[in-house]
Image: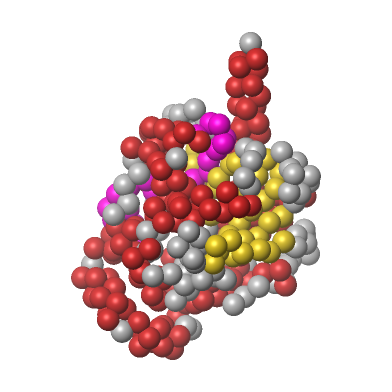
Amino acid sequence: MVDVDFLPIEADDAPAPLPRRSTVVADDGVPIAVREYGPVRAGLTVVFLHGHCLHAESWVYLCRHLAPQWGSDVRIVSYDHRGHGSSGSAPVHTCTLDQLADDLDVVLRTIAPIGPVLLIGHSMGAMAALAYMRLHPELIGSRIVGLGLISTAAGGLTTLGLGRLLHRPTVSLLRGAVRCAPRTMSVSKRLGGRLCGRIARTASFGRGSVNPSVVALAAAMLNDTSIVTMTAFLGALVDLDESETLRLLTEIPVLVLVGSADLVTPPQHSLAIVAQLPDAEFVCIDGAGHSVILEDPAAVAASVVRLVARAGAAQYARAFASAG
C-alpha cells in the first residue's frame, strides 16, 4: 500500500502532518484503521470520510492545507472504511451504507466521545454521513454541528454520469462472478493493475493538467482495494436514497461541493441536494473532476474552513439563545 506520509511534495506545499495511528474495532469485530492530527482536547473534531475504493490517504493534501490553519483549535480524524486501506476485510453482506454509518458511530464513541463534531464526506463517504444522520437524528445540532458533502449524491445515482453504468448487465455479471469465485477475480484484478492509472485519470479527474503524483496516488488506492470490496459496495450505491434525510439538516451549516467536470457524480446531483437545503453553501470548482479533494485541495480547504467558521458561529448563537 502507498503511504502518503512519505510521498514527494511540491516545493510550495506544506509538509504532510504526521498522524497518530490507532485501531478501532467495529461492533462486528472488523478492525478500523484510524488517523488523528491535532490535539485530542481541541474544541472541535472534524471527521473525514473517504470515497469508494479510496482510503484515508485521499485526504492528505487537504490536511496539508488545513492543519497549519487550525493549529490547536481543531482535531482532524480520518479512517479507512471496512475493506479499504489498512482496515480489515468484511463480509460482503456488511458492505452497506448503514454499516458504514455504524462504523462511524463506533469511531466517534471511541475517538471523540464528547464535544462537537463536524463531518466531511467525499463520494461514498458523504453517503455514509447522510446514513449516519438518518440513524441518529437526535445528534444533529447537539453533537454533529456541520456537514460537508463533496462530490456526492443523495439519490438517483444511476440516472446521471458514470452511475448509469451500474445498471448495465455486465456490472451484475461482475458482481455475481466475484461472489462465486472471489480468489480468481482478485487475481484478475491484480493482473489488470496497470489499467488503474488510466481509470483513475479518466473517471476521477477533470479537464486540466493533474500532477502525476496525484494520479499515481489515486491509482494506487484503486488498485489496493480488493475486487470483493469494490463490487460489494456497488449494491449500496445502486440503492442509494437519502433524499428524505436532507430534511433533517436545515438546522446545521452544510457545504455542498463538486467539480464542474465530475463524471461520477455530476453537478446535477449536488444541485438536487442544494434545492432541498437552500441555506447550504454551494461550491462548484471549475474544471475539477470527481477527485476534487486531490485535484484542487486548496480550493476545497478554503470551503471547509468557511464551513467550520459557520458551524462555530451557529454554536455560539445556540448557546446565546439558550442562555437568554
Task: Give the percent coordinates (x, y) of residue 296.
Answer: 60, 55
Position of 92 relative to 187 (above/below): above
At 29% across and 49% down in the image, what residue appears?
A: 156
Say above or below: 3 vs 148: below
The reply to whether residue 98 is visible in this rendering is yes
Please provide percent x and percent y for residue 30: 49, 66
Relative to 279, 76 lies left or right: right
Q: Is residue 153 magenta?
A: yes
Q: Which residue is depicted at the point 31% across and 78% down?
A: 178
**Which residue lies at the image location 55% right of the left edge and 45% below the top edge?**
119
Instruction: Spot the residue most to the top.
Output: 324
What residue is rendered at 55% in x and 31% in y?
Answer: 142
Q: Nearer the viewer, residue 241 or 191?
A: 241
Range covered by the magenta-colored residues:
140-162
Q: Look at the image and name its color scheme.
A: secondary structure
Let me know if residue 244 is in the magenta part.
no
- Pick the front one: 179 or 300: 179
Please state, as top left, top right, bottom left or bottom right, where the C terminus lies in the image. top right
**Which quarter of the image is occupied by the N terminus?**
bottom right
Estimate the x, y position of residue 56 in percent, counting from the top left. 59, 62
Q: Position of residue 295 (x, y in %)?
A: 58, 59
Q: Does residue 46 show up?
A: no
Residue 217, above or below 34: below
Examine the image and state in which quarter residue 72 appears: top right
Which sits in the foreground, 147 or 208?
Answer: 147
Q: Is residue 64 left or right of residue 26?
A: right
Q: Is residue 165 toward the left or the right of residue 204 in the image?
A: left
Q: How many marks?
A: 0
Q: Is residue 59 left or right of residue 166?
A: right
